[in-house]
Amino acid sequence: MGNPGSGTSPDGKVAGVKGECTGDGGFGVWGVCDSGHRVHGYSAMLRGVVGTSQDFHGVFGKSTNNIGVAAESQNAEAMNAACHSAKQAAIITISCLETVIRW
């Protein structure tokens, strides 16, 4: 693709670019890059990337040879989790190794 799509919006309630999939499954927006970020979000004041879902993961990360989801911060917590259910935990960690070393 030599001429990628681009869009801007002067309205804070309207996205500059939108992708929509109306069939079962699929992707609304798809990013491909062999040596860089596939999808990148930036904001000087608010969240760079936001994912929401009614019935599944809001944000998901998976890697074959590296970290699935990473968090990093210069001046605050690297990760913050809140759960609004009295029956669930904010964070659960599971190791899929047969032998778990506990420190």
Image: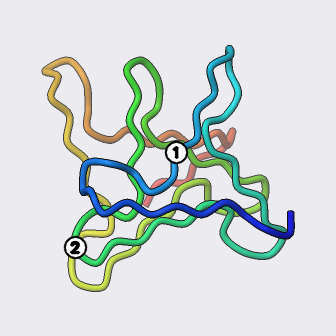
Disc number for residue 18: 1
**How would you rate the neighbour count of disc 1 (Cα within 10 Å): few for under 14, some for 14-19, many for 20 or more?**
few
Element under disc 2 = loop
**Residue 94: x, y in percent?**
51, 39
**Residue 80: x, y in percent?**
25, 56
Give the residue displayed 66% in from the left and 34% down from the top.
Answer: 27
Residue 39 lies left or right of residue 84; in this view the side is: right
Number of dots carrying numbers: 2
Disc number for residue 45: 2
**Residue 34: x, y in percent?**
84, 69
Q: Is residue 90 above or below residue 26?
A: below
The amino acid beneath tag 2 is Met
Q: Nearer the viewer, residue 11 or 75?
A: 11
Give the CA distance from mark 2 to mark 1.
21 Å
Q: Nearer the viewer, residue 88 or 47?
A: 47
Residue 51 lies left or right of residue 47; in this view the side is: right
On-image quarter of the N terminus: bottom right
Q: Nearer the viewer, mark 2 or mark 1?
A: 1
Disc number for residue 9: none
On-image quarter of the C terminus: bottom left
In the image, farthest residue toward the front? 10
The amino acid beneath tag 1 is Lys
Q: Nearer the viewer, residue 86 or 50?
A: 50
Q: Is residue 66 above or below residue 17?
A: below
Element under disc 1 = loop
Q: Is residue 38 above or below residue 50?
A: below
